[in-house]
Amino acid sequence: MSNPSSYRDRLLEIAKIYRIKEVRNYSKARKVLTVPQLELLLKKNKVPLPINKKSVFRIKKKFDNFVDKSSEGTQRFIRNRNRDLVDLLNKPYSSTFDKEHFQKFILAPLTYIFLITIFVGGPIVKKFFLDIESIQLTKELNEDNLEFFSDIYVDTLKKEEEKKQELAKAPENKKTDDSINEGFLSDFFRLNTQTVVNYLDELDYSLEGVRKNKQVEPVYFTKVPRDLSSVSDVALKKDVFIRIVLPLIVSENNDIIKDRRYLLRLIDKENIDDDENNWIMQKLKEYKVTDNDLEKLKRRMDIIPVSIAIAQAAKESGWGTSRFAIEGNALFGQWTWSGNGIVPYERQTGKQYKILKFPIFRASVKAYKNNLNTHNSYREFRAKRERLRNQKQSISGLDLVHTLDNYAETGKEYTDILEKIIIQNALDDFDIANLNNSEDKEFNL
């Protein structure tokens, strides 16, 4: 009778049944996929996994060994104490009761056993199960799989770009925050800072490289690392934060540029069809233009300088360490009176505002840019940006930062702080950066 197929064989068979393209590509390249890699590909394609009985057995065996080793010493201790107890019980028949003997061999051991059980046994068992869970959750992020992750992530980005192109061809399909594909990292549990650094270094994604080549790796994290606030190295904390938010900001700017170019073509076109008209109606609503003024729409439909966006995210979130950033993915401290939000501890009595919460970072970036591009408080910002466009000048953060004094109650003091953050961290180096897989190499419109 033939042996039953291994768990890996079952994964390969399922991948074949569901026609998982990535598995076929790796097979053609004669690359061997590990079990964690196969599981990851099946999860990515929303294919249910079979039960890995061996994994369950290994965990049970590990627990049994733990119990055996733990109980072995306990049983030896109990045998010794039982012998002492028998001797003690025999004493009344042969001699008088020995109070010192009773306290030494009965009360003291029982007390020790009770204290050890409460203060040692509980944490050991708890740590054991946490270790098992930690191994299961992090096994997909070991160094052997980083090259594999990069390949799959690049393929995911290509699919995301194809979806964006399809949306551009079919303007009537409204794009919402829920439809955003956050790519490979969106399904991960919240990572720690060192894991994030290792992953970004493996991609050869550094701020020095961006400053030199003006190319940003299209890697999108959905949350801040869980231990970023405890990192004592300030330079490392800033570096990680900038590398996380930079691709999100540049990506949103790219989407705005594509829409702007399409709008400029339609403005110059004599006759537009129904699909093009529907797209214009959608954008008028998105940018809150109520009088159908296409010139106003063009003024609002433009990028936010990368340096300003990073500086405001750093200021409002404490470089990603604030309670609002950790609990609500809120990078820019936007207020809400009706939406889902977090109540600030220092909120004055009688105030009703909250800090708006978001499911992922990208949603926070998108809402921030929509805010600057539509709210009446930032008309001066948009007007000066338009003047720079008309004069064929670059959209610089340092040129526009002092038009945002209405963003905070402190006014000019606030914009002075933003300017200082930009200069001290050389954030203006990123104003002309672009995604390295993007067709748009410049923002010269």
Image (cartoon, grey):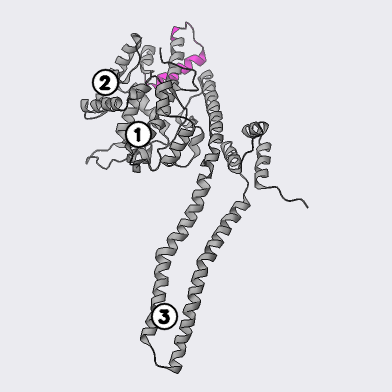
Residue depicted at x 68% and y 47%: 6
Mark 3: few, some, or many residues within 10 Å (few <14, many ≥20)?
Answer: some
Q: Is residue 238 left or right of residue 173?
A: left
Location of mark 3 (residue) = 105
Q: Residues within 10 Å of mark 2 (few under 14, many from 20)?
A: many
Q: Would you name the residue on which mark 2 appears?
A: 403
Position of 100 compared to 155: left or right? Answer: left
Tell me the quarter of the picture where residue 390 sits.
top left
Q: Which mark is residue 78?
A: none
The answer to whether residue 304 is visible is no
The magenta segment is: 267-289
Q: CA distance from mark 3 to mark 2?
A: 81 Å
Let me know if residue 378 appears in the view: yes
- The three-letter code of the residue at mark 3 reads Phe
The numbered mark, 3 or 1, whose residue comes first in the sequence reads: 3
**Residue at image location 42% in from the left, 25% down from the top:** 209
> Counting residues from the N terminus, which is met first, the one under dot 2 or under dot 1?
1
- Quick one: which residue is furthest to the right in this view? 1
Reading the image, the residue beneath label 1 is 238
Residue pictured at 31% horizontal, 11% vertical: 387
- In the rendered view, tell whether residue 21 sits above or below residue 118: above
How far is mark 3 from mark 1, CA to CA? Answer: 60 Å
Q: Is residue 104 above or below residue 321?
A: below
Q: Give the main secondary structure, helix, strand or loop, of the magenta stretch.
A: helix
